[in-house]
């Protein structure tokens, strides 16, 4: 058990096989509370104040570990080894062809049927930071190499959750990690996120085919995908657009504007998106050192039972998942998503929650 001013832990039920699950709570000096489970390194709940100082849960979720295991929405999970899709669940690396777990038609999605979001992670505490560690063996979902992953969660007093990723391998392997929280800044009881106002710092995005595999980059200018200036989400969801009709809403990867790297070729963390809920005053900023941002609007949540017995409607929450591009291992720039022996995968993504005092 962990019990410090910043971080505590408690039992949180069991898995269907009887294994116990722990729930860890990060707190800051202003009453904000973020709960994370060692099942899937999952972001379970995040209680944040609104304009009037009232706490509300801004994450969608479930009541029990068993419900997370049974779900197919990846709600709050740490996604790996590969975030999003790989076309045909196949890739070639150094002249060797690999076949992966097909769990989304003919494609691999979010690491396969037994991805990182369904694994038990080893948890520890480091000076108020929650550290999660996982060993992924060679052949996991068909991927080569033994991979060791460490993810660090820190909640600061300014409302910033920092997720720091690091991984190493003993053989070349694709690696693309992300976190998959569903946000509703109005709180659990809200109907949907159509009233949220969104901005994304990107000039292009990937159009997708019928199986949601990227097929080409397109300009955002002049269509529903242009969030370079803040725009209400509901109006964009109603915009006649073939890509929105194909995906049932937004489920597309934005190509983020690249910031200038430092002298050591370290990608800087910069703000890439912002979401605002006028009703509550809550505002979410997304900062990352990654080049891709998957924007998903909960297109298939309708009828799903969530925490407290709530039945979620369509568009009950939205996801902004930072990482590489979907299917990038099969693109021309595949080398940047390949982790090789002797090197380290590193990523930093931050979710910062604050309040606007006026509409």
Image: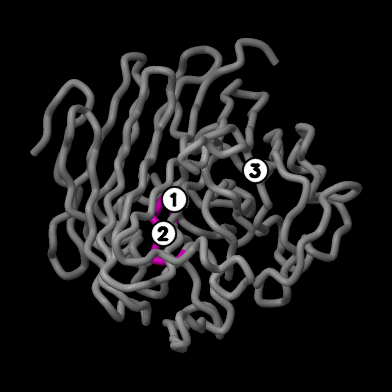
Secondary-structure class at tag 3? loop
**The quadrant where residue 55 appears:** top left
Question: Percent from the top left, x then y, of residue 135?
Answer: 22, 64
Q: Residues within 10 Å of mark 2 (few under 14, many from 20)?
A: many
State yes or no: residue 286 in magenta: no
Residue hosting label 2: 79
Question: Percent from the top left, x then y, of residue 227?
Answer: 76, 40
The earlier-in-sequence mark between 2 and 3 is 2
Disc 1 from disc 2: Cα separation? 6 Å
Tags 1 and 2 in contact by the CB under 8 Å rule? Answer: yes
In the image, is 175 to the left or to the right of 206? left
- Residue 36 in the image: above or below residue 169: above
Residue hosting label 3: 258
- Residue 243 in the image: above or below residue 92: above
Residues 270 and 163: in front is 270
Task: State the residue lying farthest toward the front.
Answer: 263
**What are the residue bounds of the magenta stretch?**
75-82
In the image, is 224 to the left or to the right of 22? right
In the image, is 179 to the left or to the right of 117? right
Kindly report the secondary structure that dominates the magenta region of the rendered protein.
Answer: loop
Secondary-structure class at tag 2? strand
């Amino acid at each position: 058990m962990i019990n410090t001013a910043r971080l505590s832990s408690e039992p949180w039920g069991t898995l269907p096989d009887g294994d116990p699950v722990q729930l860890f709570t990060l707190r800051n000096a202003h009453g904000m509370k973020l709960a994370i489970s060692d099942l899937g390194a999952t972001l379970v709940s995040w209680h944040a104040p609104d304009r009037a100082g009232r706490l509300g849960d801004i994450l969608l979720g479930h009541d029990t570990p068993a419900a997370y295991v049974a779900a197919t929405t990846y709600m709050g999970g740490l996604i790996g080894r590969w975030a999003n899709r790989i076309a045909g669940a196949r890739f070639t690396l150094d002249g060797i062809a690999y076949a992966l777990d097909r769990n989304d038609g003919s494609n691999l999605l979010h690491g396969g049927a037994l991805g990182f979001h369904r694994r038990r992670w080893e948890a520890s505490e480091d000076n108020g930071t929650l550290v999660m560690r996982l060993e992924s063996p060679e052949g996991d979902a068909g991927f080569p190499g033994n991979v060791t992953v460490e993810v660090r969660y820190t909640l600061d007093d300014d409302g910033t959750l920092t997720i720091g990723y690091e991984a190493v391998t003993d053989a070349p392997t694709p690696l693309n990690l992300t976190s998959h929280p569903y946000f509703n800044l109005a709180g659990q009881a809200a109907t949907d996120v159509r009233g949220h106002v969104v901005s994304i710092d990107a000039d292009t995005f990937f159009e997708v085919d019928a199986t949601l595999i990227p097929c080409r980059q397109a300009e955002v200018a002049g269509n529903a995908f242009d969030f370079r200036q803040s725009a209400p989400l509901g109006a964009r969801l109603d915009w006649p657009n073939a890509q929105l009709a194909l995906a049932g809403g937004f489920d597309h990867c934005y190509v983020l504007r690249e910031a200038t790297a430092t002298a050591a070729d370290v990608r800087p963390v910069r703000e890439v998106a912002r979401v605002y809920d006028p009703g509550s005053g809550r505002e979410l900023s997304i900062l990352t050192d990654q080049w891709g941002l998957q924007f998903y609007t909960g297109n298939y949540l309708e009828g799903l039972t969530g925490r407290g017995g709530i039945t979620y409607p369509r568009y009950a929450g939205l996801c902004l998942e930072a990482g590489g591009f979907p299917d990038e291992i099969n693109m021309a720039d595949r080398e940047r998503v390949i982790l090789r022996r002797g090197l380290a995968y590193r990523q930093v993504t931050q979710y910062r929650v604050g309040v606007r005092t006026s509409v």
